[in-house]
Structure formats: C-alpha cells, structure tokens
Image: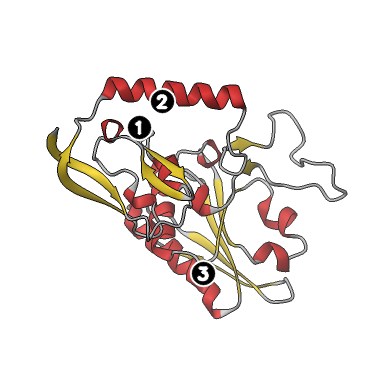
Amino acid sequence: MVLRNIVKIDEEKCNGCGLCVNACAEGAIELIDGKAKLVSEIYCDGLGACIGHCPEDAITIEQREAEQFDEEATETHLAKEKEKLMQAGSMCPGMMARELKEKGRPSAVGTAQVPSQLSHWPVQLGLLSPAAPCFADADLLLVADCVAFAMGDFHNRFLKDHSVAVGCPKLDNAEFYIEKVAAILKANKLKSLTVVHMEVPCCFGLTRIAREAIARSGVKMPFEDVTIDLRGDVSKTETIES
C-alpha cells in the first residue's frame, strides 16, 4: 500500500449515467447496481480523466493509502473485458459509436417513405466522444432536442450532410455541455458550426453554450445561429462572430 491520489465516487450523487465508465481508459470504473464503482485500486491511475465527464460532480480525487497502480494488470484487464464484449456481442447499442452512411452509397438511409439523413450514432451530446469519427472535418449541427419535433423538414433542411449533437439547454447540465463542445472543437478541425434552437427563452441557452465553448476552446469560429418558431418555421438566422 502506498499514499497516492485515487478516484473517489460519491454514490449518493451518482445517477448511474455511465459517462465515467466510457471516459476511464483503464476500465477501473463499472456500473454495479445502477451506481458507478471503482472495481479495483490497481486499475486507477489517479489522474481523474473521468471527473469532467460526470454531470453530477460525484467524482473527486482523494489522497489515501491504496494499492499501487499496475499498468500491466490494467492492460490484461482491458483485454479480458474486450474479449467478453466480443464473445457476448453485448456492447450497448445506445453507447456504441457507428457510422450510418457508407461511402459511395446514397446519402439517405433507412426504408421509410421519407428517408433519414442521420449519418452517425449516438446523437445526444452527453454520449458523444470528442474523438468520434463523425466530427472529423465535419459540418457540426448543435441542436436543441425539441427542434426535430417542431420542424417537419428538419432532416433535409438542416441534418443532411451534417454531424449532429443534441441537447436541452434548460433541463441538462449546461456547464457539462460547454466543456464537451469545447473538447470537440479542440480535438477536431470543423468546417462549420450551426446552432439551431426554438424561439422560447430557455432554448436560447444553446447559443450561450456555443459562445462559451468557443471561448474556452481557443478556436476562432463564427457560427450560424438559427431560431425556429413554434410552427416549425425559421424565424431568424444570424452569423455570430467568436
């Protein structure tokens, strides 16, 4: 046992979202009975990469007596976990990144009468990794989740040929979203950014999230800010300089 930094999880605050599990490159955290738990001290390097992904501030770093981080054991652990997933075919479909369009194939996918223009999965901002392939050299659409329900031609007018990140600026954790969008901007060379939100006051928070994320990222990027009225029509479009 040695005195060192190690992750501490407050189970009372934890809501079981699982974002920290995906953020931990060492596989030290798992969801057990609906709560994030540190499965072994030897898998935790104590750097705290998971902290910024927790929307509930349930993760901190403490200094205490703990087993030494074991890089070799961690690599073995990760290899076993990967093998389990491959054998069981049990990777959660809601969390697994995937491309929905193939090169050389028509842009529309699906068999619906009006085909979807969605090019990747997942789409919820909280589940997206800044390193996801869909962001590479992309036209990014940051959109409030109510827009697609209000706007009948959302797919063809906005979603087509765009990567999309969806969130609610009123009900979700705005600070978490600011950090996530900033990370996406820093990790990728985006072609453009378009923010689409409803005309209701709370929805304009998405514009503030985009502004603050750009400022924190250090990337100079103007963006199109589009307001949709309650009838599903575009009521205003403006270019906002960073």
Q: Earlier in the sequence, mark 3 or mark 2?
A: 2
> What's the distance in space between the residues labelled 3 and 2, CA to CA?
35 Å
Q: Which residue in the protein does label 3 denote?
A: 171
Could you tell me if residue 188 is visible in this image? no
SS at badge 3: loop
Q: Position of residue 100 (x, y in %)?
A: 68, 37
- From the viewer's perspective, is residue 225 above or below residue 181? below
Toward the front, the furthest residue is 33
Q: Which residue in the protein does label 2 denote?
A: 78
> What's the distance in space between the residues labelled 3 and 1, CA to CA?
31 Å
CB-based contact (under 8 Å), mark 2 and mark 1: yes
Q: Which residue in the protein does label 1 denote?
A: 26
- From the viewer's perspective, is residue 108 above or below residue 146? above
SS at badge 1: loop
Q: In the picture provided, is 45 more to the left or to the right than 140?
A: left
Toward the right, the furthest residue is 113
Q: Earlier in the sequence, mark 3 or mark 1?
A: 1
